Amino acid sequence: ARPLPSSSAGPPGARGERGARGVAGPAGPRGTRGRPLLACPGGVSGATRLVGCNTQACRVEVLHRGRWGSVCSAGFSDKDAAVVCRAMGLNPGRAVDRFGRYAAAPTAGPVWLAGVGCTGDELELGHCRKAAWTDEPRG
């Protein structure tokens, strides 16, 4: 058997085209204003967002009547925090308001939602039991 004649490599193949860039998501929360309430990374999901984040926590706001306002921190639990983070596609968070060292300035806008009582299995804050929308903005 005779060896096959050596040959040089052929021309390179065509390069693939670069795909289109994805749509940019909303900017995350900035600054440290507001009363931190939740420890999970910032984000926005439908009518819920995290604002006033610092290195430890964020404040939860909900969109109601076309205006953003806070969720009352009284009684806000780790189960409530887990629901908020899950709705945003984030890892479960925990309530940190009870750890006073993370608190910043008080909420400047309205407080729309009070008495949140999630079981931890809800898909979003609005599905939680005992959640009461306030009739008038508080704060």
Image: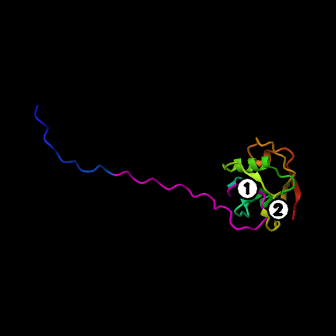
Q: Name the secondary structure under disc 2.
A: helix
Residue 80, label in figure: none
Say which quadrant the C terminus sits in. Answer: bottom right
Given residues 29 and 93, the one toward you in this image is 93
Residue at 84% from the left image edge and 46% from the top image edge? 117
The correct choice, above or below, for 35 with respect to 89 in the image is below
Q: Nearer the viewer, mark 2 or mark 1?
A: 2
Q: On the rendered structure, is 2 left or right of 95? A: left
Q: Mark 1 — residue?
A: 39
Residue 87, position as x, y percentages in the image: 71, 48
Residue at 79% from the left image edge and 44% from the top image edge? 127
Given residues 98 and 83, the one toward you in this image is 98
> Which quadrant would residue 2 be assigned to in this image?
top left
Answer whether residue 51 is magenta in the image. Answer: no
Residue at 71% from the left image edge and 64% from the top image edge? 54
Magenta region's main secondary structure?
Answer: loop
Question: Which segment did they paint magenta?
Answer: 15-43
Residue 15, position as x, y percentages in the image: 34, 52
Q: On the rendered structure, is 7 left or right of 42? A: left
Q: What type is the residue that disc 1 sits on?
A: Ala
Q: Earlier in the sequence, mark 2 or mark 1?
A: 1
Q: Crowding at label 2, few (<14), some or many (≥20) Cα neighbours within 10 Å?
A: few
Residue 104, position as x, y percentages in the image: 79, 66
Between marks 2 and 1, how big is the CA–CA gap? 13 Å
The correct choice, above or below, for 28 with respect to 89 in the image is below
Q: Mark 2 — residue?
A: 100
> Which quadrant would residue 103 be assigned to in this image?
bottom right
Q: What type is the residue that disc 2 sits on?
A: Gly
